Amino acid sequence: MEMPPLTQPTSKDASIPKGEWERDLSKLGTHLLTKLHVLMRVSQIYDSKNTALHQFTQECLEAINTFIHQQGDLCLKIFGEDIYLNEQRLRYSVEGFNSYKYLLTQLKKRRIGEVHFKAVIEETPLREFIYLLMGLEEGKKENADRLWESLKAKQIFSIEIHPLEEMEQEEGPLTKKEDSREIGKKVFFESIGAIKGVFTQIKGKPSADVRRLKRLVRKAVHLIMEDESILLGMATIKNYDEYTFNHSVNVAIYALAIGRRLGLTRNELSELGITAMLHDIGKSRIPLEVLNKPAPLDEEEWGVMKKHPLMGVEVVLNLKQLGEINPRMVIGIFDHHLKNDLTGYPKLFRKKQVSLFGRIIQIADAYDAMTTPRIYKKIPFTPEQALALLLREQTTHYDPILLKIFIGVIGLYPIGSLVLLDTKEMGIVYKTNPDPEHLDRPQVLLIEKRGDRKERVTLADLMERDEKGRYRRSILKTLDPMKYHIDIAKYFLAVGKN
């Protein structure tokens, strides 16, 4: 059976109807599950070195690798009585029903909730995986960890395993559009907690559990691809007391949005997201009196601070639960303060090109840092001021092409900007306009004062026209929210509650 081609439609290519995409996914998924079903059954008859197994393994390899070549990776996930392929629920067909139920039953019996093929796989590792999987004792909660450790012991790092109960509790699929904003809030705050946990663990021992963080990044990737404004709105939250952790999550959100505009695959976006989340992990090795000093750092303290990218590399290389670490992740952390003209830090012995991940994170890092209150700078720049500073230093400090993409992401009036409209209303930019001809006409949250001293927030699209064809509202100028005592993040969190 020849597998159908599969290309998921993107915002740039609307030529593939959603129904057609789902039919293609169903065909490919049915074929994939059928081949896995056969190989799993055959493994119960022959030992792993039997030559009769070769044909079945090759057919299964073709199914897996075709999917990976087209999608970047393959994530097979169990949720309830459903199987998901790369976050898309697989609708089984009549001919594929037996394979679907067999795979679902066998994985649930062994308490396996997710199998993630991160890269193209070869015959021997696939055989090893199947035999280790089918050899697991049924019903054991520790099976996922045991299987993953066994794979790593055999130098198989391209397959990640996660347990069933974690998937059911934490990794519900993102299928309901109306729930996406609430899911975004949950992912955002859980990510802050997860990165804080990693920092805390690193301080006490050379390693930390980053599996929860990786799962949250995959959810963030899904949300960014579904509707980037959901997480971009959350990035307006600036927690002064949890700066390092809040900042790490915000930088990841901005980086993922840039990566999505660049057309990175899901797997590449996941790696970029993890890199951005961990870009400041080296600060876990910096003394708190230096990290939290309210006054400017002296020369010696600044010398210590400049070491955090290199310290971050050392930490990440010891995070064994990251699995196989792509070199671009490590290089991205090393590069994130180098600057485009290499005048940043760490100091280089010879010139090199700043990596793509490093250049993306530089922009995301600088923008969020400038727009966030700090212990030594209580009043941050407004989004508009921060953009002006980034543009002033483009070419020398930042990649001008990536900076242009970033401006397209956050808009001419960045998400979270407080604006005054020609109707004398105040609004908060909520979602950018994707039309490059109308970047000055985003969606805004209107702040309406009411007689009972409460505020009502309504969403308005600045593309709306009246009966005479004139725009109902236009932006006159941006305002400083500090002067009006307006907490921007509060309004994003309130969306949908009133």
Image (cartoon, helix red, strand yellow):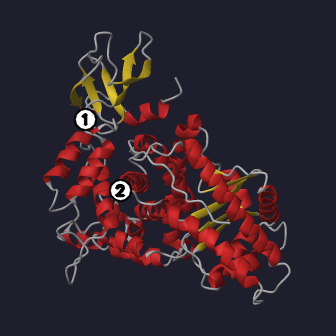
> Residue 179's spot in the image, x, y percent?
58, 37
Residue 37, by quadrant, is: bottom right
> Residue 303's spot in the image, x, y percent?
24, 73
> Residue 337's spot in the image, x, y percent?
27, 66
Q: Secondary structure at mark 2?
A: helix
Q: Secondary structure at mark 1?
A: helix
Residue drawn at (59%, 57%) of the image: 86
26 sits left or right of 46 in the view: left
Amino acid bearing label 2: Leu
Residue drawn at (18%, 62%) of the image: 397
- Quadrant in which the N terminus appears: bottom right
Residue drawn at (29%, 69%) of the image: 305
Visible in this render: residue 160? no
Task: Give the mark, 1 or 2, whose residue is nearer the N terminus.
Answer: 2
Count residues near mark 2 (Cα–Cα under 10 Å), then give few for <14, some for 14-19, many for 20+.
few
Visible in this render: residue 497? yes
Q: Which of the pair 301/1 is nearer the observer? A: 1
How far is mark 1 from mark 2, CA to CA?
Answer: 20 Å
Q: Which of the pair 435/281 is nearer the observer? A: 435
Count residues near mark 1 (Cα–Cα under 10 Å), then give few for <14, some for 14-19, many for 20+.
few
The residue pinned by badge 1 equals 437
The numbered mark at residue 98 is none
The numbered mark at residue 262 is 2
